[in-house]
Image (cartoon, rainbow, N blue to C red):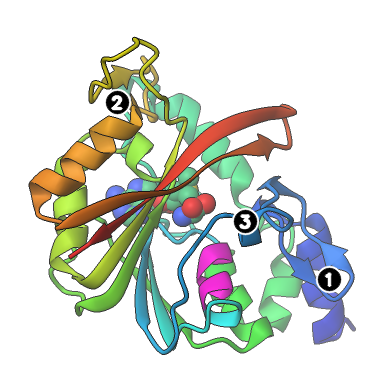
């Protein structure tokens, strides 16, 4: 009979992971490996602060905020129900395509024995990470469009989600309402205007059914300012490798002060 240690290692070695994460000497095979670059992203100290991590996925960033930036506690919010259903608001015409993809992402059926051994009822990695690293983080099901039921937090964070939303303005405004001190937004596939002397705020429609817009840095800054953040800074432009495609994707991290 498997013990808990073997179950954890089984899920790290054979599970579907969004981020590469390290348990003892085993690294999970994530779509993104931030382990070597995370310290270079200029995240601010979070000493004794509460954090709301919206679109938290497997909790890679929540864990980093707690362990390395010394946050007091993190509430992770995500619309993923961990039942194999699509956890993005995709267009109807793309539903079948995304349904197959998401079904394949759910590793619960394959690794049920290991999850059960750890007392977990589904493949929610956020709960797994909380348990095995004994961290002050809590998963709540919820959407960025409806954060009314959540308390205000010192810091709000939303990483790589805005690109997937039909309505980024409502989403950012919801984060604003829940922010006491500052809000950190990480945008994937961000771009800089290539037109000299015309740093325009631009949105580019991607033509995909679940990944709607690419944003220029100026667009995000203008949205954050217009919503009410008093000061908006660019913390970092960086590239991260998509392991499966061996392609580096551009990101920009912004910090909006309330
Ligand atoms: C691309 S992943 C990003 C994960 C992580 N935040 C990061 O920075 O790498 C986006 C996450 O947002 C979740 N998500 C999608 N739509 C959402 C919504 N409306 N509200 C909250 N979470 C959502 C997805 O289930 C997924 O876990």
The residue under label 2 is 92
**Residue 9 vertical placement versus 253 (above, below):** below
**C-alpha gap between disc 2 and disc 3:** 39 Å
Q: Does the magenta portion include 121? A: no
Judging depth in this view, the residue of 11 and 243 nearest the camera is 243
State left or right for residue 55 relative to residue 66.
left
Q: Position of residue 225 (x, y in %)?
A: 15, 47
Which one is in front in this view, the residue at disc 2 or the one at disc 1? 1
Which one is in front in this view, the residue at disc 2 or the one at disc 3? 3
Q: Secondary structure at mark 3?
A: helix
Some atom of ligand 1 lies within 8 Å of the CB belonging to the residue at label 2: no
Q: Position of residue 159 (x, y in %)?
A: 43, 52
Which one is in front in this view, the residue at disc 1 or the one at disc 3? 3
Task: Give the magenta part as a residue range.
Answer: 59-65
The secondary structure making up most of the magenta span is helix
Q: Secondary structure at mark 1?
A: helix
State left or right for residue 177 relative to residue 88.
left
**C-alpha gap between disc 2 and disc 1:** 38 Å
Q: In the rendered structure, which disc, 2 or 1, sits on the residue that comes first in sequence?
A: 1
Q: Quadrant of residue 212?
A: top left
The residue under label 3 is 40
Q: In the rendered structure, which disc, 2 or 3, sits on the residue that comes first in sequence?
A: 3
């Amino acid at each position: 009979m498997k013990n808990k240690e073997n179950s954890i290692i089984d899920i790290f070695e054979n599970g579907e992971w969004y981020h590469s994460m390290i348990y003892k000497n085993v690294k999970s095979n994530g779509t993104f490996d931030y382990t070597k670059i995370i310290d270079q992203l200029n995240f601010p100290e979070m000493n004794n602060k509460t954090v709301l991590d919206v679109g938290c996925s497997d909790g890679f960033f929540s864990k980093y905020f707690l362990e390395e930036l010394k946050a007091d506690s993190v509430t992770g919010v995500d619309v993923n129900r961990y039942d194999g259903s699509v956890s993005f608001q995709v267009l109807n015409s793309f539903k079948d395509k995304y349904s197959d993809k998401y079904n394949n992402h759910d590793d619960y059926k394959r690794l049920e024995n290991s999850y059960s051994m750890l007392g977990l009822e589904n493949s929610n990695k956020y709960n797994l990470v909380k348990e095995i690293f004994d961290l002050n983080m809590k998963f709540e099901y919820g959407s960025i469009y409806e954060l009314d039921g959540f308390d205000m937090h010192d810091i709000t964070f939303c990483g790589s989600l805005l690109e997937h939303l039909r309505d980024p303005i409502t989403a950012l405004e919801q984060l604003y309402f829940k922010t006491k001190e500052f809000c950190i937004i990480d945008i994937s596939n961000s771009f800089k205007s290539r037109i000299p002397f015309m740093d325009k705020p631009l949105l580019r429609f991607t033509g995909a059914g679940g990944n709607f817009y690419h944003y220029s840095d100026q667009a995000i800054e203008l949205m954050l300012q217009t919503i009410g953040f008093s000061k908006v800074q660019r913390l970092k432009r960086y590239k991260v490798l998509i392991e499966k495609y061996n392609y580096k994707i551009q990101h920009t991290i912004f910090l909006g002060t309330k």
